[in-house]
Image (tube, rainbow, N blue to C red):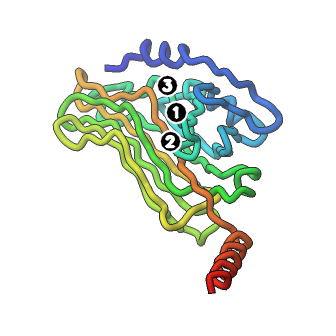
Amino acid sequence: MLSRAVFWAAAAGLVALAAPARGAITLNNGQAVSLATVLASNDHQVNIGDKLFTFNAYTSSQFPVSSVFISGYIAANPNDGIGFDITGGFGDLFPGDINASTFDINYSVEVNAAALAQGYRIKDMSLVFNGAASGAGSYSRVLETASDPNGPPGNTLGGLLATVVPGGQTNQQAFLDFSPATYSRVNVEKNVQFFAVGPGDFASASFIRQSFSQRIVPGPGSVALFGLGAMLVIRRRR
């Protein structure tokens, strides 16, 4: 069971390494900042690698925003994944009371201007967390929906579900491939739930990782040049 003391100790043990600024906050791999600091900044934005994350909203009755941290994540090959970890002492704070402890985060991710000019676009997204639970009917769960802000209203790209259910479905990671489409910006709505059925049961997690992979999409000019080059090669062979 996750006690209040353990919850606050875990939250206090994380140190924010980045300070608020007039522009976007920049995080390197492993650096962290309080979500409260991000939401108190002018634009609610965090730079990680060549991605810009805008955190639009956070809601929870159980987990104060000051206890939630955002940590930068950059894979060894950045094209294989850039994103962030949501860290803190999460869990069902009152096991056995028939209510789940939850929080919701709404944010967007976009390729920054320099990478966008080079042709990079987001091609997929992945989710992983270290959820755990005990007791029949208990669960730890992360559910999210991705959408295209440049498309028509309600244009959902897909959903991801990672869940841990004792004696049942256990899937601590999920993956969503946008292929063949790619996007310069994606909106994400994330719901996280922890439910422990009995007083002696628990449901918890300490991190939830979100990352996005990318690839270069040739622009119209590049395609035209490629076609012209191919024609010249064919003529020379003739």
Q: Quadrant of the C terminus?
A: bottom right
**Which circle's residue, 3 or 2, is located before the other in the chain?**
3
Quadrant the N terminus occupies: top left
- CB under 8 Å between discs 1 and 3: yes
For disc 1, the neighbor class at 10 Å (few under 14, some 14 to 19, many from 20) is some
Q: Nearer the viewer, residue 136 or 197?
A: 136
User: What residue is drawn where x is 75% and y is 42%?
Assistant: 43
Q: Nearer the viewer, mark 3 or mark 2?
A: 2
Side (left or right) of 130 relative to 31: left
Residue 31's image quarter?
top right
On screen, residue 16 above or below 45: above
User: Outermost residue, bottom direction?
Assistant: 238
- Marks 1,2: beta carbons within 8 A: yes
Q: Residue beneath label 3, please?
A: 88
Query: How busy is the neighbourhood of tag 3: few (under 14 within 10 Å), some, or many (20 plus)?
Result: many
Residue annotated with mark 2: 210
> Residue 152 in the image: x percent, y percent?
59, 72
Q: Mark 2: which amino acid? A: Gln
Q: Residues within 10 Å of mark 2 (few under 14, many from 20)?
A: many
- Foreground: 103 or 210? 210
19 relative to 52, above or below: above
- Coordinates of residue 195 in the picture (x, y in percent): 32, 34
Q: Which residue position is annotated with label 1?
A: 86
Query: Which quadrant holds residue 203?
Result: top left
Query: What's the residue type where badge 3 is placed?
Result: Gly
C-alpha span from label 3 to label 2: 15 Å
Q: Amino acid at mark 1?
A: Ile
* 23 left or right, relative to 236: right
First reached walking from the N terminus: tag 1 or tag 2? 1
In front of the other: 36 or 226: 226
Between disc 1 and disc 2, the foreground one is: 2
